[in-house]
Amino acid sequence: MKKALVLSLAVVLGLGVASFAQTLTGYWDTDITIVPTPISLGIDSKLSVTYTVGNWSFSSLTTIDETGWTAQSFDVIGSMFAFTLGSGLVFDPLLVEFDKWTATGGFNFTGVDILLTFTLEPGVTTLLIEADYDGSDVDVSIDINLGSGEGCDFDFAGIDIEVDFPFCCDIDVVSKIVFTCDGFQYVTFDVVGIELPGLPWLTLDASLKFETQTKTLTITPKVDFGIEACLTVIMSQDAEAGTYPSGEGMSIGALAIDGISLVCELGGVSFTGISYWGDGEKPEPLKGDYWEAYQISLTQDSCCGGDFEFDLTIFFLEGGAQLFDIAEIDAYMEIGLTEQFTFSTGIDIILDPLPTSFGWTIGFYVEW
């Protein structure tokens, strides 16, 4: 059992067929105010990441200011047959808890537009049914409200949602999200088919379980898995047997499973996810005491003849105090304005341990 935490950049949910086009888009919008006397730093930063596969889009929105991590939400929208579906999850990073889940479904039935909106807050459920008909002579609109807003009405007990979806190099991911009357409980991501290089008879299953304050990574040895080209199992020899977070790898004979890394291209954007619990030197982009990291990077031609480079990395600390154990956000941008002049800037936001701290760098390079 491997225990720690993660964000859903991670938490990238999805639906569709493996042949569907996949893209990874987003933006990082940050304003920083520095007051020299007395010295103070203000920041307003929003990070949005959207993963699109087929007719479905899955988004994450993170908001940070000088007081720390202030808001986190996840949204999904897509279509299935004649139905349009949407869902939104809201968390409170300051209190490290679930706030609200809203699920919507719309369809047209013989000329009548019907919209269902289900809302779940801790201990409270409501269901709104809206129907609209626009005729040549008569227009009809009906709203039906179920739930008093004071408790889990209409005998609501819980919802389990299970989804299979492709991610990166045709890896099949099975995800399950569970809600009860008290709200969000957990979401799991299971991957099967991980083959150990040189050991075709030995394979692994990997399962990630995310809760608001904890994350569990479970590695299960099995037989007859197939490895994907971009999914790598990090191994070492002569490791002691043990379980994370003791810092020891899971031993299979003389081999130790020290981590797993995933690197792939999504619509020109590079995604890297790495989990490492071994004793050896940590692979990039991991650093310090962090055991897991997710990175988005982009390199392309700029408008002025140079190169534009951008990378954003989120680090996770085992047993951290923040939502999903997110401990640090590191971003860097570099753009060649001319062949002789390059501008660069970066921001480092440390969320754990508290209090939140910021580091901002601005640089340039001139060549003649």
Image (tube, rainbow, N blue to C red):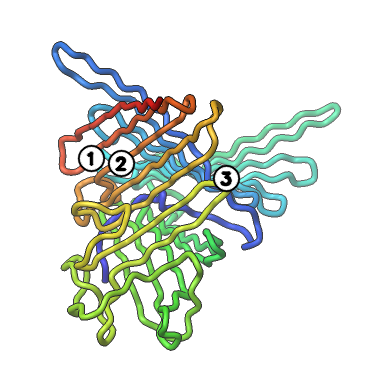
Q: Which residue is mark 3?
A: 77
Q: Which residue is mark 1?
A: 351
The disc, 3 or 2, on the residue closer to the chain's N-terminal end is 3
Comparing labels 1 and 2, the label whose residue is closer to the camera: 2
Q: Residue 253: x, y in percent? A: 26, 87
Kind of residue at badge 3:
Ile
Q: Residue, x 43% and y 61% (percent of image)?
A: 262
Q: Residue 10: x, y in percent? A: 41, 52
Quadrant for the C terminus in the image: top left
Q: Is residue 51 above or below residue 307?
A: below
Asked whether the viewer can see residue 61, the reply is: yes
Kind of residue at badge 2:
Ile
Kind of residue at badge 1:
Leu
Q: Which residue is mark 2?
A: 329
Element on which disc 2 rests:
strand
Comparing labels 3 and 2, the label whose residue is closer to the camera: 2
Q: Residue 289: x, y in percent? A: 19, 54
